[in-house]
Image (tube, coloured by chain):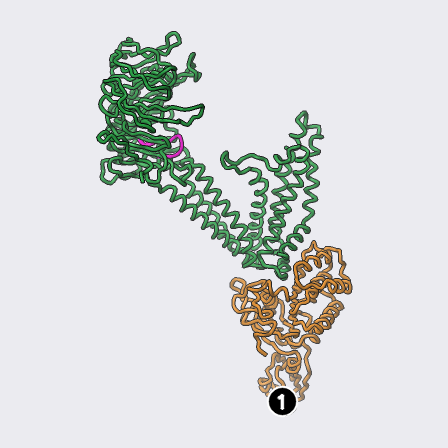
Chain colours: A orange, B green
Amino acid sequence: MNVDRQPLVVDHLTVRYGSKTAVADVSFSVGKGEVHALLGRNGAGKSSTISCLVGQRRAAEGTCRLLGLDSWRQRRRIMERVGIVPETPDVPPGVSAVELGRLLGRVRRSWNAADYGVRLSRVGVPLKLPAGSLSKGQRRQLALAAALAAEPEVLILDDPTLGLDAVVRRTLLSELVGELADRGTTVLVTTHDLGGIEGIADRVGIMHRGRLVLDEKMGVLKQRFRRLRVTASDDAAIVAVETALGPLDPSIIRRFGRRIDAVIGRTDENALGSIRATAGVEIDLEPLSLEEIFVALCGDEEGGA
Amino acid sequence: MRAFAALLIHEIKERKALLVAAAVASVLPLLAPLLPATGSNPAADIREAVLWFVVATLIPVFAVLLGATFIGRDLSEGRLGFFFAQPMSAPAIWFAKLGAVVMLVWAAQLILMLPTALLSGDAARILLKTIRVLPDSGVPLSLLTVWVGPVVLILIAHSVGVVWRARSPWIVLDFVAFVVIVGATRFVLGPFLMVFAAGVVMTVVGWILASAFVALIVGGAVQLIVGRVDAKRGHRALSGTLWIVMTIAVTSAACWGWWVRSATPEDLSRVYEISLGAGSWIGVTGASAGRMDFYPGFLINTHDGRWIAAHFGSDVHERGVIFSADMSRAVWTVPAGPNESQVLVADLNRDSVEKRRTGIVLNRQWRGIALSDDGSRLAAIEGANVVAYEVGSGDLLAAAKVGDGFIPAGVRFDSDDVVAVLAFASEKSVDDSSGSRRRWRQHRFGIETRHLDEGRVIDSPWQWVVPGWNSAFGYTLERRETAGENRLQLVDPAIGTVVADLGDMPGRWSDIEVVDDGRMVLLRQHAERPSLEIVSPDGRNLCRVDLPGQGWLKLGGEVGPHLLAIGWTTWSGEGETPTRQQTLLVDLDEGAITRTFAGVSPVLGGWRNDTSPGAWDIGSVATRMMEGEGFTLSLWEPDTDELHQLIPFPD
């Protein structure tokens, strides 16, 4: 598929704050109807990427395009067809849900007032209380309802589950999947709720220290990464196993006496065969959750970017 | 437009509590007259006074609060993204939000004022008080301060709020730029402030303020266009726009100021002040199109057209240029500070005439300057003191104080070493319509001896005219009051004897001129018909010339041997604009009018000439200079009997 025709394209994006580089040469794209999870630790550069993508911050280098339009130069046109749920709910605090609906109904060409009302009722957001009086979860639900009522072609969710309890998190994400799948909406979501997004995202990108260290389909990713546990009978076998791990693209290698725990990014049967063939060695290969893969890739000692 | 209107309404609604506060506060002026402390003052006056106090207190507070928060709070609390997430352009967001807070402040003000205004029965006056900034500006003060003022406060509060919240190093640049812009503006205004060119100053200040106003509005829009939700970037955009616009504004003001100050004589459209000497150089100050109340001044050689710019100042303390009797030098003063005037000099005998500073600094309140005949020395009156300087070096040679309640008013070199000082003391007059008259005293001040003598009292017939001051002759003319008449008498100053009684000098416009050969020309301004009488130096009547009719007459100089110029101006009705000016040339030997020039009047003579020595010499340029209706300046050439217009320059 031609990347330029994708509804969401980030092309060699670099974002700087003074002398500090927050995002360095990041490129990815999201296909129509795809749910793309952009993961990363705090400060990895996810929000800066999204800020550029929605035309609120100018890129130092590179470009972002939404629906074929330049995010910075054509923001106003883009926003007719894009919904945003920011990391921190930014609905004016003095505005009630009803007033917000009235305002956005005037501002936007496409506005589904009925859907807006139904969604708010369903999630129990008080309609007449000012947004400033709502709980954090209610404000997030309000922002999401506002974004969805605009019937966007692209929905951008910046950590929509942040600060929500587990039940609300699951509800929110599962509702999203149901609704958006029906509509064919393209979704870019950043989240720390890796368990929640695991069953939803079609594709995963992981940012670490401003760089995109991984970008691939969820199925492929989960297929590729494995935990390898090797138990050896003597020290010589341990050394031999360590040497044989190289072709398996290990992210983490930990040694506990005569045992090695490793997360490998390749299940190369030849390499595994050579380990198995080592005298006195037992190996155990297990699948990994998204969270485990994420920790393996980003869980270094220095923390986030 | 749809989004703009929606946001405008939303922003107003979100802050509607402000209008409730204004409505509550609007009751205060109505309640004020009920307070016991208000005494017997009219209730309407009390209501209005309290209203203006409330408006002056609350509206600036509202304006600053709204200005600092309508963008700034959203920016700092991360909520500005909500607006950028909608299909609205950045200018629409800015102008909708700005428009909303401006309308809110205006509405709050209207709500505050309306009850009192309606109750007064003169609502229009209260809502648009017609106090004017300047008499001619026609701009109501209230419109500027009460209605536009809050908008300015909103914009300033917004900018300061953004700068403060951004906390970027650009704040240092902002401070430097502010200081530079203020300093540059002061630099541009300096020359005009010095000469009290209020119109030019107000124009420049108005231009700078209007530019700042526009820059703040445009800067806010650029802040959102370029910076969007990025506070630091927004700050840079706002500051960049503001200082670029202000730099352009100050630069253009500086260019205009330079243009105003770089007038040439050809730019003069009318002449206001003329300084005359014995030779062909004259000093001229006048108006020039587009230069408002900045009056360019020049030293112009009427013979060969050479000139140098010599701004003599627009204020009353600057007195034009003084020439030495030999016309080798000219001096004048320029403002050098709030209370100081610097003396400048030009050596007129050089091929290339240039002005230079003398180093002599006088008190700006100086009341007279004279040059010695060769221009090497300068005498001046500063307050009660007479001072003498060496022009070349600027050294102070001598100074003395005139006492006994007499105030020095004029100074003249009798010789290179002796300065004559004319001083006056005011006293009540029994018959003068002005209510007071002046006693005059002439002192002699020796520069080498540094001695000021006690002075000789001169009794002047008129408050402003001092006979015997401008011309050297044997007897003094003195005023004697006899039976309520102002009799003019010729007195031998040596023994105090009356040599001749020259008769009554009625009316305030009567005048006298002592011509070169010692004869005196008396202008008697009788009610029925004015006349000239020519009297010999010893007081004998020689002849009488009846003038054509009523009008204001002034004695000019001798344009040729025994040929005196007389100015004759007539008015119609009560207006102060003369309808007709003429110059008559009177043959003093024949006692007849020999020539009439229509539309002009001699420059010499009248109240405004304190001419340099030699200006009255027979046939000098000064005597032949004539000013025309519309403040033109012409020179009569006796050889061709033609009037050559000097200013404005003929096309």
In the rendered view, tell whether residue A32 sits above or below residue B320: below
Of helix, strand and loop, which mostly describes the magenta segment? loop
The quadrant in which residue A32 appears is bottom right
Q: As rendered, which of B17 and B128 lies closer to the eye?
A: B128
Q: As rendered, which of B307 and A221 lies closer to the eye?
A: B307
| Chain ID of residue with mark 1 | A
Q: Which residue is mark 1?
A: A269
Q: Which residues are magenta?
A: B312-321
Q: Position of residue B74 (x, y in %)?
A: 63, 55
Check residue A173 for magenta coloring. Answer: no
Residue B377 visible somewhere in the drawing: no
Q: Residues within 10 Å of mark 1 (few under 14, many from 20)?
A: few
Q: What residue is at 34 percent from the left and 30 percent from the top?
A: B628
Quadrant of the drawing holding the C terminus of chain B: top left
Q: Position of residue B160 (x, y in %)?
A: 56, 49
Residue B591 lies left or right of residue B367; in this view the side is left
Q: What residue is at 70 percent from the left and 54 percent from the top?
A: A94
Q: What residue is at 34 percent from the left and 13 percent from the top?
A: B479
Secondary structure under the numbered disc 1 in the rendered image: helix
In the rendered view, tell whether residue A168 sits above or below residue B292: below
Q: As rendered, which of A30 and A302 lies closer to the eye?
A: A30
